[in-house]
Image (tube, helix red, strand yellow):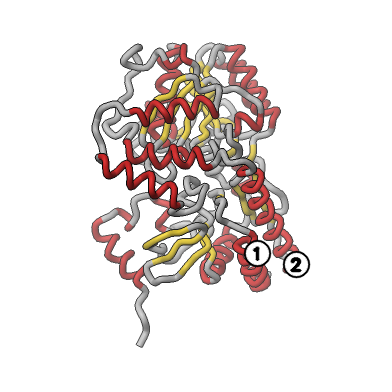
Amino acid sequence: MTNISKNDTLFARAQKTTPGGVNSPVRAFRSVGGTPRFITRAEGPYFWDADGKRYIDYIGSWGPAIVGHAHPEVVEAVQRAAARGLSFGAPTEGEIEMAEEIHKLVPSIEQVRLVSSGTEATMSALRLARGATGRDKIVKFEGCYHGHADSLLVKAGSGLLTFGNPTSAGVPEDFVKHTLVLDYNSVEQLQDAFDSFGAEIACVIVEPVAGNMNLIKATPAFLQAMRALCSEHGAILIFDEVMCGFRVALGGAQALYNIRPDLTALGKVIGGGLPVAAFGGSAALMQHMAPLGAVYQAGTLSGNPVAVAAGMTTLKLIQAPGFYEALGATAHKLARGLTAAAKEAGVTFCADAIGGMFGIYFSETVPTSYAEMMAGDRGKFNAFFHAMLDEGVYFAPAAFEAGFVSAQHDDAVIDATIEAARRVFAKLA
């Protein structure tokens, strides 16, 4: 008698009442094929599926689990906060403490507004930039994902300076007609855009370390040109650090690159696994926000006391001496080990890492743009993904997503992953 997987049963059941059986598209495994794993619990660097199988987890809730799953101090803080009440719809001291902590760690953020999701943070930052400048046009870069707000679901147009087209049904062309889409890491296109539209551009929004077309790092020259052009033309520079903030360094990517953006969007790590995000910048810019100014934004659950408790505890834990040095060493060890294992087997493969993020690519060289990322061997990635899943290693179920390590991914966990990869690469050769 064949045992029926509980994952299969749950997926079939979920599809009856939830579109695609999931509440966020990448979870559906459509990119890689097969049945998604339904997770029942997690601890440290591991999680377990509905069939009881344990996996080494390299998505970490897509970034937030930087101190590992179910960290005792985070869990205790959540339990204490929950016992006092789940939500008040009124201010709490915890919100003040989080704002102060963010300002301390990210000096460009003098004032901050808490929200519940990265999408809220980026869409609110865009509205603020447009409200503060009185301009409509925005610049984004192909392959950077800034949430599912209408004006940000855009693909590149047919030429360097054509405006984007909607990438989702239900987004009117009028909503994206002011969105200019350029190639990531192209200083030339950025210069051309400002030469043509400089007086009309409200803002430039960028992932300074991209994590949604796999891991792609911005070049220093690219970000420096962006800062200079925004300053010259009176445009707002927005760093979307929802993913890379507190992931690549304690002060975020802006600390690594030594560039001060006008606005920053944060998320993931600052919630410690619960829904907290934020956007902030100079006090002068943030004064445009209601109730002080004319730019409106609100949220019933913004600054939720339970979520803030998880986030604040996480922010304290990541300030431990040597935390980021160890986290970065772990990610680089994984990248080096996977690359060496692939080379032994003769498989075309490379990997990269920065802070607690890493990328794996079935290509000769680490990509620097969306087009280069798209040129990789997705079929080989899909085969690798499923073979590693069989080995008990869970990478992101798409070739276009960065991976994450936590403080709980110790040498034994990394070594086990590399050994599993060595077996898998041998089969793929």
Give the residue drawn at x 56%, y 48%: 402
| Rendered location of residue 312, percent (x, y) | 44, 37
247 horizontally vs 43: left or right? right
374 horizontally vs 5: left or right? right
Nearer the camera: disc 2 or disc 1: 1
Q: Which residue is labeled 1 in the image?
A: 415
Q: Earlier in the sequence, mark 2 or mark 1?
A: 2
Using a 10 Å C-alpha cutoff, classify the residue at mark 2 as few (fewer than 14 neighbours), some (14 to 19) or many (20 or more).
few
Q: Pick whichever, 15 or 292, lies toward us.
A: 292
Q: Is residue 295 above or below residue 389?
A: above
Question: Which element carries disc 1, helix, strand or loop?
Answer: helix
Residue 143 can be seen in this image: no
Locate residue 298: give its quadrant. top left
Res 346 label:
none
Q: Quadrant of the N terminus?
A: bottom left
Give the residue drawn at x 32%, y 19%: 296
Locate residue 118: give its quadrant. top left
Q: Is residue 23 above or below residue 106?
A: below
Give the residue drawn at x 29%, y 60%: 15
Q: Is residue 27 above or below residue 118?
A: below
Mark 2 and 1 residues: CB-CB less than 8 Å, in contact?
A: no
| Rendered location of residue 20, percent (x, y) | 33, 56
Using a 10 Å C-alpha cutoff, classify the residue at mark 1 as few (fewer than 14 neighbours), some (14 to 19) or many (20 or more).
some
Q: Which residue is labeled 2 in the image?
A: 344
Q: Amino acid at mark 1?
A: Asp
| Rendered location of residue 293, percent (x, y) | 35, 12
